[in-house]
Amino acid sequence: MSLFANSNNAPGLFITFEGIDGAGKSTHIQAFADALGKKYPQHEIVLTREPGGTALGEQLREILLHHSMHLETEALLMFAARREHLATVIEPALAAGKIVISDRFTDASFAYQGGGRGLDLGKLYELEVWVQMRLPDARAGEGGQKRVLLQPDLTLLFDLPSEIAEARRSAARDPDKFEQLNASFFEQVRQEYLRRAKDDPVRFEIIDANQSKDHIWNLLQNIIIKI
Ligand code: TYD
């Protein structure tokens, strides 16, 4: 069954990559995009990322990844960048039938600001609804349509024990603010990702990232067959 028959009432497809730092999602995202582009040459691929994906979002990314701030400020800025990203990149692309692949989205806010840093999940649910709920536009005569909470059609969660991810990260030369945090922080991030996945098993594909690159690439190719 094609994922194009999705729940977002849009002809495009929205795919996200998630996982703790060091899980290896960035290693595969470009090749995944290329392979999907070959399978669906009629659908343009938009490869993007969060925080970021817009000029304003990239400025916010710079601030978020390199400055310390109150936890709620951090969450609000993540969702502010996300609102801009949705409004100017993701939603228009989905409406035009494009395939949007984003390196992180809202699950990362639940995992990092919620699981890792301990922000009340209730506040994150409120922000998720605030930013992702599309209301029918009464002025355009859409009063009868249902509200839609825009979510990815598919989320690939690269799952890896936090100690193994830490060992991989220690090889990285220039860690950002989040990458400097310790294994217990990342274990909490991981557990929140897994909780989100359990809550929405249809949307999530969990990839065991504790395997060779070739093996993971095979898993990804099998997922592409199903899209
Ligand atoms: P990441 O996506 O890992 O980029 P790179 O591979 O270039 O390091 O970095 C983004 C960081 O931002 C990552 O540590 C997770 C964090 N983040 C949040 O804390 N909350 C969010 O909502 C998002 C999207 C990212």
Image (cartoon, helix red, strand yellow):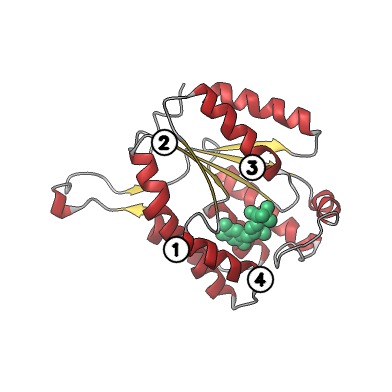
Tag 3's secondary structure?
A: strand
Residue 204: x and y in percent read 57, 39
Disc 3: which residue: 157
Sequence order check, earlier mark of 3 and 1? 1
- Label 3 Cα crowd, 10 Å radius (few <14 / some 14-19 / many 20+): many
Q: Are marks 3 and 2 in contact (CB under 8 Å)?
A: no
Instruction: Residue under label 1, please give it.
Output: 127
Name which of mark 1 and mark 4 comes first in the sequence: 4
Three-letter code for the amino acid on which mark 2 is drawn: Lys
Question: In the image, which disc is placed on residue 98?
Answer: 2
Measure the C-alpha gap from mark 4 to mark 2.
32 Å
153 versus 220 height, above or below? below
Residue 81 place in picture, x, y as percent: 48, 62
Task: Tell me the residue that label 4 is attached to.
Answer: 66
In front here: 72 or 13?
Answer: 13
Q: Amino acid at mark 1?
A: Leu
Q: CA distance from mark 1 to mark 4?
A: 23 Å
The amino acid beneath tag 3 is: Leu
How would you rate the neighbour count of disc 2 (Cα within 10 Å): few for under 14, some for 14-19, many for 20 or more?
Answer: many
First-in-chain label (4 vs 2):
4
Q: Which of these two is toward me, 28 or 211?
A: 28
| Sequence-first disc among 3 and 2 | 2
Left or right: residue 177 compared with residue 42: right
Distance in Å between CA atoms under marks 3 and 1 = 22 Å
Q: Secondary structure at mark 4?
A: helix
Viewer-proximal residue, 36 or 159? 36
Q: Residues within 10 Å of mark 4 (few under 14, many from 20)?
A: few
Disc 1, disc 4: CB below 8 Å? Answer: no
